[in-house]
Image: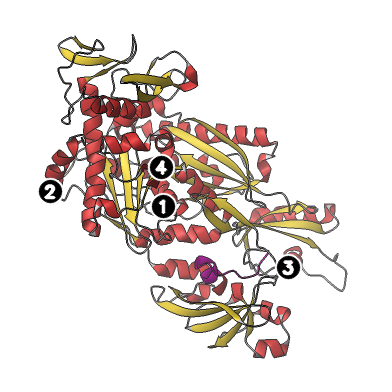
Amino acid sequence: MAEHGLLASAPWKQLLKHRHDFLVMAKEFNPDLAGHDGASRVKLHFRALEKDGEVSAEKIVTVPSGVSAFDAASWNGIAIDSTCGGYGTCKKCKIQITDGSVEPSKLDFRAFTPDEIQSGWRLACMVRTTKDISIDVPPLTTRPKAATVGVGRQIILRPGIQKRYVELSEPTLSDQRTDIVRLLEAIEDIEPTYSLDILRELPTVLRKNNFKVTAVFADQELIAIEGGDTSEIRYGIAFDLGTTTVVATLIDLNTGAPAAVKSILNKQQPFGADVITRISATMMDPEGLGKLRTLAQETLAQLTREVCEEADVNPLNVYEVAMAGNATMTQIILGIDPEPLGVAPFIMATADYQPVDATELGLSIHPRGKAIILPSLGAYVGGDIVAGALASGMDRDKRLRLFIDVGTNCEIILGNGEKILATAAPAGPAFEAASIKCGVRAAAGAIETVKVVDGKLEIGTIDDAPAIGICGSGLVDAVACLVQLGILDSSGKFNAVDDPNLVERDGEKIYMLTEDVFLSQRDVRELQFAKAAIATGWALLAEEFGIEDKDIQQVLLAGSFGSYLSPASAVKIGLVPKISVLRIVSAGNVAGEGAKMALLSTQERHGAMTLLDEIKYVELSDREDFNDKFVERLAFPV
């Protein structure tokens, strides 16, 4: 393999997996842990109690040192009372340390009597687990706010954007505290940072509103002071920044409910249909990166305007966005040269990003709004796939599951919650119908379904409009049906059958689906190569895992294509393992769902970061048996 050259010449080369040190997460939970070995873990012994004091459930869990007891419980399905999501404001997450010692925080002294403190009572969100301890959890008295997102995932609402309404005493000659001290002393649970801009606004906002204001925080940063009580108004936007399509979901951060959803084509389309051509554009034109960045920013800006208009939400009340995108799209929109992603050895600028100002994405939301960027496993398993793994619970579900995001670059994950493997396979553009002679995008008139009815093909088009071409799902159906009817043999060659729709044109056999739309021998080959690349990918993961196809308990088909793909047809052509179609499910837009989770829960953000350590990347290009496996998977099952 050449040392340099575009990815097109070495499609399977993958960035070495970034290893994220648990110390980073531990420090984020507790800055006082600087110097502590974040990779160490502690055991927590939880006992859930009934109202009569009887133990209803018992669980011993192992978590990274420094995680709060509240988060450790939530991660492991142990319910602890809370209405603030673990920020210390509601003082409801009461637990009792029964074995081991934990120093009380200042909030503990406000929540408990001296005798209770002495007896080990603490607020779970304030307990930092730096040693093994035993914990009793009282029965729930309230139901914490939660949202269902992803593939059946329910999360506790704990967004990074928090609001605190305060009514302050006005200054007097005997109380000459500064404005910022007066404000922050009234907010007990957050010790924020703040900018000069905040100090410029603070005196006016306080006095204009009779010292009754709402402070807005992005994690530990004070980003706004608003007059009156605006605590019920806070929004965020989740972006799925796809190479082809971009989706935006406006989220009410108080309820977790979506307020509006919009999608449009990525405005970078004129520069090419895939990441390789867009990387090439930045290499060929000195101004290419700037042009592509501007187009990506314009795409997100348009979607922001549209979702806010639809929901009648002031963009200034949008304080945070979360974005999931592949590594190339992410680096381009941030103005980072993507050329190293397209030439060996395919290196990202970074695997994980600190929060950035939303203005870096070209967004006109709150002027101090923040953008959360989902981390990437590597140059070709990006933040969109990490978001998908998060949303589908690949690190939590104990079933053996196969996750496939079908596209030009197909990402594949196989895991059982304990062991997780991932890889990327170069499927090419067949599933998007880009390399198919009569191929079209999924729009009105595209053939999207093909069935065998009474020995003949029956086609279905989007919106029941006259057929104008065939999209990816229709292509898979058509080939599966032609194999079923014996018109195509297992090698993908048209048989010499007596069928008036099988004709020859320009020396090539084609099958007429309609008077104008046909499937050529070359089209079949394109689909074969694409499905063989994907099937080889998951087959090698299964081999690495030490399991057989039949052991896979569920297949998740992700992305927009996965939503329309027929499970039966996918099995017939060998795209997915030969298992019951009832175990093959559409996961939907899990990249967007993962971005929503990052908005709604800081806990899930940390979960996304830990996936960088929990998922092992398997490089296909280094496998000597790849070509042999690929050839084996070319044939259609019969």
- Across and down, in percent, residue 17 comes to 30, 56
Q: At label 2, which amino acid type do we have? A: Asp
> Bounds of the magenta span?
71-83
Residue 427 colored magenta?
no
For mark 4, give the secondary structure.
strand
The answer to whether any part of residue 272 appears in the image is: no
For mark 2, give the secondary structure.
loop
- Circles 1, 3 touching at the beta carbon (< 8 Å): no
Quarter holding the C terminus?
top left
For mark 3, give the secondary structure.
helix
Query: What's the CA distance linking mark 2 and mark 1?
Result: 27 Å
**Residue bearing mark 4:** 558
**Residue bearing mark 1:** 389
Q: Say whether residue 124 is left or right of residue 548.
A: right
- Circles 2, 3 touching at the beta carbon (< 8 Å): no
Q: Outermost residue toward the right?
A: 173
Whichever of callouts 1 and 3 sits on the residue coming sooner in the sequence is 3
Whichever of callouts 2 and 3 sits on the residue coming sooner in the sequence is 3
Q: At label 4, which amino acid type do we have? A: Ala
- Across and down, in percent, residue 48 comes to 58, 77
Q: Is disc 3 surrounded by few (<14), some (14 to 19) or many (20+) residues within 10 Å? A: few
Whichever of callouts 3 and 4 sits on the residue coming sooner in the sequence is 3
Q: Is disc 4 surrounded by few (<14), some (14 to 19) or many (20+) residues within 10 Å? A: many
For mark 1, give the secondary structure.
helix
Secondary structure, magenta segment, majority class? loop
In depth, the one of 414 and 97 nearer the eye is 414
**Residue bearing mark 2:** 625
Query: What's the CA distance linking mark 1 and mark 4?
Result: 10 Å
Q: Which mark is residue 181?
A: 3
Q: Nearer the viewer, mark 2 or mark 3?
A: 2
In depth, the one of 153 and 131 nearer the eye is 153
